[in-house]
Every structure is written in C-alpha cells, then in structure tokens.
Image (cartoon, helix red, strand yellow):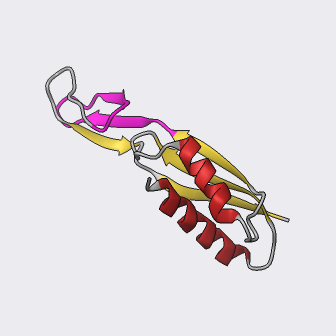
Amino acid sequence: MHELSLACSIVDACAERAGEARVLRVTVEVGQLAAVLPDALRFCFDVCAQGTVLEGAELEILEIPGRAVCDECGRSIFLSSPYGVCECGGLLRIVSGTELRTKEMEIA
C-alpha cells in the first residue's frame, strides 16, 4: 500500500512548511490514473498526522480526470485507465490524470 508512504510525505512536507502553526486543512490533487486510492490515502493521512501539527486536519482530495490526446487525429478523450487507443487507431498521449500534488494548506 504505497498510500502510506505518500501520506507520510505529504504530512512531512506540510509540517515542515507550517512550522509551529496548526494545520486545519490540506488540499491535494490526485489524478485518476495515478494509481492512488483516495480512501486509503485519507486513512493513511490521519495515521501519519498523529502527534504532528496536522493532527485533526482535514484532507481534501480533488480528483483530476484522466485525459489523453491522439497523436494522429488530435482528438481529446477521457481515460479511466492509463492504456487506450483512439478510434482512429492512433496512439494516445496522456495529458492529465497522473498528478499527485499538494495544492493548498490552511493553517490557524
């Protein structure tokens, strides 16, 4: 379960940035193609936050849809998995949905 290491990295980075200030909310963007389970990330975030300035903070997850562009016809399509072929037979280039980044942090 790599969500545990991801959650610990998020908590560490936010705690370092917050200093002694209490963190109320952390907003992260998670692409639907990033192979991250939002519920597992939330659970692990709560575990990793215990005993830190993030304890009790809300983790808001913004899911970014997977989207690709066909290299042949230029068509833009939504993807639910990281693999696919355009209707024209062209190869797809993923342009969004693999993101995993901390977007905002609200402190008291």
Q: Nearer the viewer, residue 49 or 102?
A: 49
Number of marks: 0
Note whether 58 is above or below 33 in the view shown: below
In the picture, measured across the screen, residue 2 lies left or right of residue 20, that is: left
Q: Does the magenta-highlighted stretch encompass residue 81?
A: yes
In the picture, measured across the screen, residue 33 lies left or right of residue 74, that is: right
Name the quarter where the C terminus is drawn: bottom right
Q: Does the magenta-highlighted stretch encompass residue 19?
A: no
Residue at the extreme right: 108
Indicate the position of residue 96 as horizontal and vertical percent values. 40, 43
Indicate the position of residue 74 as horizontal and vertical percent values. 25, 32
Picture quadrant of residue 95:
top left
Note whether 19 is above or below 100 in the view shown: below
Span colored in magenta: 64-82
Residue drawn at (33%, 30%) of the image: 76
Residue drawn at (62%, 66%) of the image: 11
Residue drawn at (20%, 20%) of the image: 87
Note whether 17 is above or below 69 in the view shown: below
Indicate the position of residue 41 as horizontal and vertical percent values. 56, 50
